[in-house]
């Protein structure tokens, strides 16, 4: 018998594959929630945090498609996010143009059906109570790892999942965008 084969036989778990963890991110809830707390997220740092801390192999960012946001989409892809677009609707409210792209259904569809067989554990990034049914489903299937809420103000419908909740403000020092004064880029 080959020496490497013996080592593997003597050390159970050596051949075990790494867990396949995926993140499903409600981009608007994340962006607005963090901004309401007075800071900006560095998406490259956030992606690395998800990978290094939780072994997230795929991070799906659910986002509204706006024609003049191509630079943002390029940056998010470069940071390692897989973008899932939702068409947006433009309307006027109080004489101000508003763009709305509700991604809830797409996020639930991907987490509970399309990607469901491809991951072991899921991290849901949102404080929106519309995801309570998804969290319940993932918990029943033993696939819920964490719920990352963008700020402390999240839906009361998520309270039953409090043991999974991580507040984004606790990650602030690790993932905050900081201007350096050199071309406006973030510090590494």
Image (cartoon, rainbow, N blue to C red):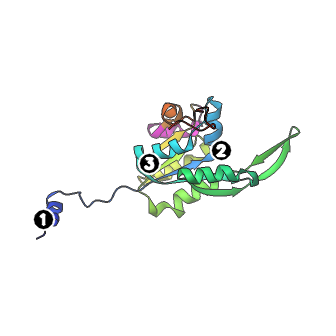
Answer with left or right where residue 147 lies relative to residue 89. Answer: left
* Quarter where residue 97 is shown: top right
- Camera-near label (2 vs 1) is 1
Q: Where is residue 160? Give x, y as percent.
A: 49, 39
Residue 165 at x, y = what percent?
48, 38
Residue 104 in sight from this viewpoint: no
Q: Earlier in the sequence, mark 3 or mark 2?
A: 2
Residue positioned 19% across, 57% down in the render: 12
- Would residue 158 be counted in the magenta stretch? yes
Neighbours of disc 1 within 10 Å: few (<14), some (14-19), many (20+): few
The quadrant in which residue 1 appears is: bottom left
- 3D distance between C-alphas at marks 3 and 2: 21 Å
Q: CA distance from mark 3 to mark 1?
A: 33 Å
Q: Which residues are magenta?
A: 153-165
Question: Quick one: label 3 or label 1, which is nearer the N terminus?
Answer: 1
- Residue 50 lies in the magenta stretch: no
Mark 3 in CB contact with mark 2 (< 8 angstroms): no
Q: Position of residue 37 (x, y in %)?
A: 61, 29
Q: Which mark is residue 51?
A: 3
Residue topped by disc 1: 3
């Amino acid at each position: 018998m080959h020496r490497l084969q013996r080592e593997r036989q003597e050390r159970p778990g050596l051949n075990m594959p790494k867990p396949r963890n995926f993140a499903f991110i409600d981009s608007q809830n994340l962006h607005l929630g963090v901004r309401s707390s007075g800071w900006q997220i560095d998406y490259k740092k956030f992606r690395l945090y998800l990978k290094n801390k939780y072994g997230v192999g795929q991070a799906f960012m659910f986002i509204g498609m706006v024609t003049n946001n191509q630079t943002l989409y390029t940056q998010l892809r470069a940071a390692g996010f897989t973008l899932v677009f939702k068409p947006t609707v433009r309307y006027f409210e109080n004489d101000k143009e508003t763009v709305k792209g509700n991604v809830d259904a797409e996020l639930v569809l991907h987490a509970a059906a399309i990607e469901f067989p491809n991951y072991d554990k899921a991290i849901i990034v949102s404080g929106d109570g519309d995801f309570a049914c998804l969290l319940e489903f993932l918990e029943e299937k033993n696939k819920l790892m964490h719920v990352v809420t963008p700020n402390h103000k999240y839906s009361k419908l998520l309270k039953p999942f409090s043991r999974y909740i991580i507040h984004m403000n606790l990650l602030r020092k690790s993932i905050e965008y900081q201007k350096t004064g050199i071309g406006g880029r973030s510090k590494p």
